[in-house]
Image (cartoon, grey):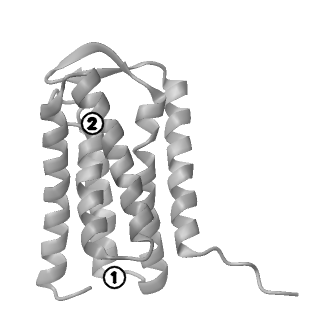
Amino acid sequence: MGEKPKIGKQAFALLLAMAMSLATYGVCVLWGPIPVRVGLELSSFYASPYYLATIGLPFGVLVAEGLIDFRERGMSLPGLLLAASLVALGVLHGMKWFVPIPLSGHGVVLGFYLVHEMVERREGRKWKLLVGVGVLLQSAWFKLVLWSDPASLVAGLGLGMVVWSVQRLVVLRHGVR
């Protein structure tokens, strides 16, 4: 009996990202039309399931990185901080549906993801950055052109970068990589 075939880290990250994106799409289709908040008000626009599903790609890559880190290093500080950051991103991403604030959930995740991928210099960095830039361009098209809502995108990107900065400061303060 041979050894079970192993899936590589990059393939795992890509598969998990695609699975999260497809799951998000499925939930959006089942949920029905989701109104878009522009500024503090719900607008007459509805978010396409295709638009909403794309954020599963960078979020799935981050989840995969956390799982890989956990498997390799166990309960390490960077891994625990990434897990805490993912929870914070999820809460901030969904908070706008319950609290009327001008905040792009896509922006929050992308602000964290893009800085994380630029600084961490992990394996597969180029394709991961390409995914992030692609989702950012799509989000910018919807937010800036279709919905005229630049404030929420900028606020979301900024808040995502703040979450990443807090995580990074804690890691650096404890001298762990």
Is residue 140 shown above or below 6? above
Q: Residue at x 52, y 35 (%)?
A: 25
Name the N-terminal-most of marks 1 and 2. Answer: 1
Q: CA distance from mark 1 to mark 2?
A: 35 Å
Residue 3 horizontal side relative to residue 154, left or right: right
Q: Quadrant of the C terminus?
A: bottom left
Q: Residue at x 19, y 43 (%)?
A: 156
Q: Residue furthest right?
A: 1
Residue 37 horizontal side relative to residue 173, left or right: right
Q: Amino acid at mark 2?
A: Ala
Q: Residue at x 27, y 46 (%)?
A: 91
Q: Residue furthest top?
A: 44
Asked where in the image residue 124 lies, by quadrant, the reply is: bottom left
Residue 115 location (% of width, % of height): 23, 62
Give the label on residue 140, or none: 2
Q: Residue at x 15, y 82 (%)?
A: 172
Q: Nearer the viewer, residue 108 or 96?
A: 108
Local SS, label 1: loop
Q: Viewer-nearest of labels 1 and 2?
A: 2
Q: Quadrant of the N terminus?
A: bottom right
Where is mark 1, residue-wise? 76
Residue 150 location (% of width, % of height): 15, 32
Q: Amino acid at mark 1?
A: Ser
Residue 66 horizontal side relative to residue 97, left or right: right
Residue 165 location (% of width, % of height): 14, 65
